[in-house]
C-alpha cells in the first residue's frame, strides 16, 4: 500500500489545533479530511479543503476515513476510542490514554479483536531534549546512571476559568496532563519501576485540581524523580542525569510547542525542532579516563514522526512505536501515584 490515508480529527481545541492537525498535515501520505467542530469552523482557515462536521458519527460512519484522531477532553477518551474501534477505524487518542488502567485494557482488547491500530499521542518522545537524553544514556556518556530527574515546569498563577483541566472531574490536573509525558519518557528509558512514591498538591489558591507533583520511581540502583508545577517562575534544569562517570544537565523546553502556537510547522519552517546553541546541555564526564566538560548539541525534535509512524504501521507493516500497553502502564503509574499520596507511603508497582 502506498496511497494516501484519510484522517478524521475529532476536536479542534488547543490539542487538535496546535498539535494534531499540523502534524497530520506534515505527513505527505496522510490527508486531514474531516474535522469535528461543534462551535465554529476554525480548521477551514488553515486547512480549507477539510470538511467540517458537527456530529462524530459523520466521521465514524464515513467509509473513506481510515484513521480517527481523538483530541477531546480526557474524560471522553474511553467512550470515543471505543466507538472509533467498533466503527472499524484505526485510532489515535490524545494523551492521557484513559482515566483508569481498566478502561485502557478494555480498549487494547477491543483493538486486538477488531485488528485495528490503536496508539496514544505521546508526542514528547520526539522532544529535542528527550532525544538528546536518550543519546547520552545509550552512549553511556555519564557511566552507569544512578539518578535521573526530569521537570516540566510552568508559571500560571491564575486558574483559567471554564477550563476542564482546572476542574475536579476525573482526569483533570497536572499529573494527568504534563505528568503523562514525564512518566512515558521514563518508561521508554527504564521500563517499569519497582516502587512509586508521590507527593501531589494543589498549590494555587482556589484550585481544585492538582497543580504540582513530585514522583519518585524506584528502579533499585536507579532513582528517577519527576516533577512539575504551575508556580515555577524561575525555572531550573529540565533534565539532570548523574552517573558513575559524570553528569549531564539540560535547561530549557523543546521549541516545537511554542513554534506551533505561532503557526509554524515542519512544512513552513526551516530547521524545524532545532534548539539554539545557548540551550544545549552540559556534559561533565571522565569516561574512559578522558575528562570532558562542554556542551552537547541538542538533536532536533520531530513531533511529525509520531504520525509518520502511524502511516508506516498501517501502510508498510512497520512496528508501532507508541504501544497502547505502554500508555496503559503510564495510567497505572498515575493511579498508584495518587494511592501513594493518599497513604503517604511508597507503593509497589503492579498491574
Image (cartoon, helix red, strand yellow):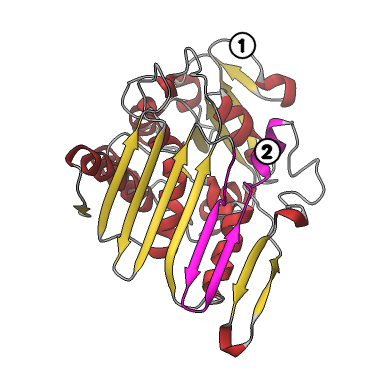
Q: How crowded is mark 1: few (under 14 residues within 10 Å), some or many (20 or more)?
A: few
Q: Is 125 placed above or below 344 here?
A: below
Q: What stretch is highlighted in magenta?
A: 234-261
Q: At x 33% / y 20%, what residue is drawn?
A: 168
Q: Which mark is residue 203?
A: none
- The Cα atoms of the two marked residues, 2 and 1, are separated by 20 Å
Q: At x 58% / y 82%, what residue is drawn?
A: 286
Q: Is residue 239 highlighted in magenta?
A: yes
Q: In the current view of this chain or complex, which residue is farthest to the top?
A: 39
Q: Position of residue 38 (x, y in %)?
A: 53, 12
Residue situated in front as seen by the camera: 110 or 248: 248
Query: The residue tagged with tag 1: helix, strand or loop?
Result: loop
Query: The residue tagged with tag 2: helix, strand or loop?
Result: helix
Residue situated in front as seen by the camera: 267 or 281: 281
Confirm whether residue 119 shows in the render. no
Q: Where is residue 177 in the image (x, y as percent from the top left)?
A: 44, 35
Amino acid at each position: 500500500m502506498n496511497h494516501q490515508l484519510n484522517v478524521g480529527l475529532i476536536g479542534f481545541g488547543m490539542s487538535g489545533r496546535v498539535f494534531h492537525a499540523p502534524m497530520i498535515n506534515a505527513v505527505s501520505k496522510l490527508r486531514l479530511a474531516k474535522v469535528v467542530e461543534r462551535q465554529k469552523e476554525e480548521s477551514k482557515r488553515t486547512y480549507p479543503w477539510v470538511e467540517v462536521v458537527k456530529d462524530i458519527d459523520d466521521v465514524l460512519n464515513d467509509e473513506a476515513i481510515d484513521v480517527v484522531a481523538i483530541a477531546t477532553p480526557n474524560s471522553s477518551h474511553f467512550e470515543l476510542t471505543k466507538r472509533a474501534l467498533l466503527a472499524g477505524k484505526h485510532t489515535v487518542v490524545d494523551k492521557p490514554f484513559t482515566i483508569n488502567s481498566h478502561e485502557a485494557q478494555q480498549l487494547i482488547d477491543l483493538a486486538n479483536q477488531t485488528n485495528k491500530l490503536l496508539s496514544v499521542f505521546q508526542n514528547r518522545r520526539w522532544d529535542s531534549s528527550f532525544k538528546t537524553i536518550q543519546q547520552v544514556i545509550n552512549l553511556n556518556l555519564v557511566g552507569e546512571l544512578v539518578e535521573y530527574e526530569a521537570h516540566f515546569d510552568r508559571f500560571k498563577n491564575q486558574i483559567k476559568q471554564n477550563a476542564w483541566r482546572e476542574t475536579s472531574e476525573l482526569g483533570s490536573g497536572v499529573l494527568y496532563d504534563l505528568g503523562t509525558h514525564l512518566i512515558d519518557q521514563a518508561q521508554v528509558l527504564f521500563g517499569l519501576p519497582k516502587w512509586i512514591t508521590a507527593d501531589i498538591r494543589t498549590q494555587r489558591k482556589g484550585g481544585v485540581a492538582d497543580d504540582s507533583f513530585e514522583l519518585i520511581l524506584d528502579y533499585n540502583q536507579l532513582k528517577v524523580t519527576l516533577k512539575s508545577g504551575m508556580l515555577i517562575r524561575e525555572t531550573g534544569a529540565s533534565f539532570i542525569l548523574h552517573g558513575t562517570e559524570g553528569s549531564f544537565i539540560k535547561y530549557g523546553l523543546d521549541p516545537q510547542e511554542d513554534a506551533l502556537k505561532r503557526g509554524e510547522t515542519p512544512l513552513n519552517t526551516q530547521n524545524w525542532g532545532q534548539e539554539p546553541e545557548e540551550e544545549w546541555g552540559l556534559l561533565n564526564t571522565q569516561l574512559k579516563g578522558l575528562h570532558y566538560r562542554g556542551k552537547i548539541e541538542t538533536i532536533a525534535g520531530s513531533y511529525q514522526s509520531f504520525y509518520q509512524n502511524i502511516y508506516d504501521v498501517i501502510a508498510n507493516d512497520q512496528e508501532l512505536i507508541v504501544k497502547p500497553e505502554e500508555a496503559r502502564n503510564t495510567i497505572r503509574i498515575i493511579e498508584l501515584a495518587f494511592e501513594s499520596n493518599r497513604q503517604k507511603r511508597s507503593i509497589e508497582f503492579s498491574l
